[in-house]
Image (tube, rainbow, N blue to C red):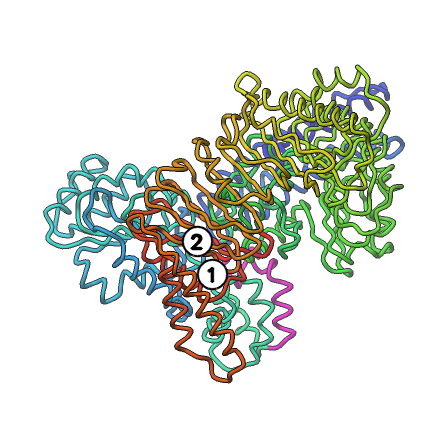
Amino acid sequence: MEFIGVGLSMLFNSILPHLAKKMKESKLNKIAIHSDIDDFRREADLLESKLEDAYSRHEGAHKAKLLETNGNLKNLCHDTHDCIHQFTRRGSMKITEFTKKIKKLKDDVYKLSKDTDKFMDSVKEQHLGRPCRYATSSDFVGRHKRLAELQELVHDLPGCWQEEPKVISIVGFAGSGKTFLAKEFYESTEVGVKFKNRTWVTDAGSHAEVAKNILMGIDKRGNHAEDALDLQRLCDSLRNYLETSTHQYLIVIDDMKRWNMWNDIKYAFKDVKGLVLVTTTIQEVANTCSQGINSYVYRLSPLDREESLELFKRDWGHKGDFGHAEKILKKCDGLPLAIVDVAHYLQRQGELTSTRCNDACSNLGALLVKVDDCELERMQWVLMNTYTSLPGAIRSCLLYFCMYKRNMDALPKRSSLMWRWQAEGFVDRKTGCKYLNTLINHNIIESMEVQTDGITKRCRPHGMMAEYISKISKFEKFAALVSDPVEMPNNDVRRLSFEAGSAADDGKFSKMDLSIVLTLAVSGKGCKAILNFKKYELIAVLDLKECTNLEHSHVNYICKLVHLKYLSLGDSIGEIPKAIGKLIHLVTLEMSTNKTVKVYKDVLQLPKLRRLIGRFIMLGEKQDGVLYKFLEKESVLETITGFVTKDGESFPKLMLHMWKLRKVKIVCDATKENATCKKGKQADDKEDLTKAIKEFLLRGTDTFQDKQNGQSCSLSINFTNNNGKPWAPPLEFLKCPGSLCSLKLHGGWGLFKCPKQFTEISGITKLCLSHTTLEGKDILASLTNMTALEYLKLVEVILGPLTIESGTFQRLMRLCLVGDTIPEGITIQREALPHLVSLHLISQAPIFKVEEDNQVQPQVEDQISEIEDNQVQLMNIAEPNKVVGDQISEAQDNQVQLPNGCLESLREIALQCGVNHAMHAAWERAAKGHSNRPAVLLLPPNA
């Protein structure tokens, strides 16, 4: 049974050994107590299984009631765990009192189970899939642009009757208007003229039932009863009909949830004239349906601020001060269904006032989980079905997001988030990525920042889902985000996250029971009560990176929290004490600071430590054989990002013995203040570091690969303020045998000259070179032999001119080019980068060109420069010179070209957010002329 993310057996297994020890010490008969606890667990298991099964067969208020029951069950489980925990603490509870409480809890779970059975017997069973009614025409405010884009796609996509079917997939969060947009398109006059054969079906029932519904909708005169539900025969009949028809077909499959269904029926649409339009909330479904060259994935964006306000005004229906609605509209997060439901709710309250809008904003979560007479019924229906469609363990991971603020600076990083999930036992090392990807794939969690390699870096739940899970989380005592100084969570909430200013009042938290807290995160100042780490008995996750008044005395107490698995500290801590060696269960130590932190070698002897994140420098006496032996035989340390080595301090020698190390970052600090050692010592230091890196490369080969966890090696070296003095970087390792998956090199390389063949290290798929002081064209020329390369990032002060030649980088999927100044020109020849999916160009005005018949047009940049110089001289004139603007636009259109047959796999183009409007518009026009119509994104600053 899943227990708020942690398996119930796992939760009780963590506390039952303490109970067994306590019972043994008391020398009392424990048979009755163990029997009651076993009965409780068995009944709780059975009840949760019933509830999970019932979610798929009930809707509306019935499902809300089942969710309420599930919350009550989890609270009973919490109470049972706390009762056992309290009893095991010395002097906290007598055996007689403990026996009575356990028996009562067992009786309560039996009663809850019986009441649930009665409820389910009293209501009619309902089938999942009851659609929300279509929204009124006002719901389409702000969607005219999207409809025009959809219609344009139908015209622009190539070849309606090529071998692969033509499929447009509309994908987005539930309630974003996908079905309504498809309906508007389906019923438009232009579509009616072009597509004489049309039908609309919903993805419900078996694959054969869907195929039969399509066939019966297209061939209204045919008799297909004989086809029964034989999928093969139905698809054959559908294909035969479409092949003999003189009209093009349009088939809409609404709310598709199964990617394998499309694979089963798609052959019926090959080599015939027409279009399939799919709506879905699941990204992998959209990708599967629209993978051919005739197809396109259309991501439906939320309404912007102006569109949201316009929709709210129309559904409000009369005049008012709509400035009051700003806050509630922000929570609706551009979701049309939410805006309409909230507008109708506020209509029923009376006049639109600041008080009513603020009350609605504060009570939004409660309104969404209301069991009877829900006043936001359609939005509740969408959120409940989305939430309950997830497996229990993934639901717990989703609830965990309620502890994070929604501003960009506080959004969780992917890695830290999953490490916290692991520390609490929600996921193991394999399922963390899988669960997060499921949430992103279902558009429940949206990516807010994406790395160069396409992996989500920061993410958050959509606005209405955030409100929904926040309320559920508090009801189930799962977690609370304390964002208001006057707001105080219940005493028995298991996870607490304090925003800045909300943890400063000692009086509000002095009586809170902190012994049961599993996760604590503090921003800003923490009061004495909250930072009294003697009180935390079960805590596994401690995030204090934003705590402003954390002191070294606090860290001494933190080092006594024996259950701690994840620890994050911030700028106020510059040294980790030796006492860290007592945290025998610690898996992750993360120092979220840019300054160097001193750490003793004792941290390396922690038996379960896997990750050291920060900028560390090693302290301690001369290393002995005991530590070396531990690192070789017992250490599980896999990631160190990173260690600062100046004057060759002990880390390189230690690294030689870290046989399980798979990811390492080394900062070679050779600044003047650290350049005090003798030349002989410098030579020894360089030799030690070179040797350590060479050994690390050998461990990256297949012989040393960690096959069980599928891990490969990653190396990052930062040559800080080097400039070749006082000692040159040990770059000779590039010519050594070995294997890496990822290599990052940062800093001036001094006299090092990039050789014709950059490296002999094999297996590198991801390469990042930054501020090497070499010319971009020389770097590119040396990388062409790296045939396995999939991701490449170059960061230089002066990047261009660059030419990517035909036939090079055949496996490269993502390319990021960053110039501190405007590059002189980037040219991509035809047949280069055939598998490139993502192209990032980071500068104020990226100069980019695709060669036509191998003829370069270098004069374009000069044209733009000359025109922009003229434009600058006109800036003080009252009326802007439109002719000059048109000339720039024309020149930039000539400059930005993506002709068909080049970069055929391109799906995404990312520019710096500060790029001028004319250049951005030129890229968008170029993207529309490309067969894939790649998305043109503006990256946030410092992305």
Q: Image height check: is 343 above or below 924?
A: below
SS for callout 1: loop
Apparent side of residue 381 relative to residue 589 in the rendered image (left or right): left
Q: Name the disc covering residue 172, or none.
A: 2
SS for callout 2: loop
Residue 4 visible in this rendered orientation of the protein:
no
Check if residue 868 falls in the magenta segment: no
Q: Image height check: is 190 above or below 488?
A: below
Q: Are marks 1 and 2 in contact (CB under 8 Å)?
A: yes
At a point 23% along the width and 54% down the height, the residue shown is 250
Measuring from the top left, give residue 79's x and y in whole percent: 72, 39
At a point 86% along the width and 37% down the height, the residue shown is 557
Measuring from the top left, give residue 164's x and y in whole percent: 24, 43
Region in magenta = 353-382
Measuring from the top left, give residue 486's x and y in whole percent: 77, 61
At a point 54% along the width and 41% down the height, the residue shown is 436
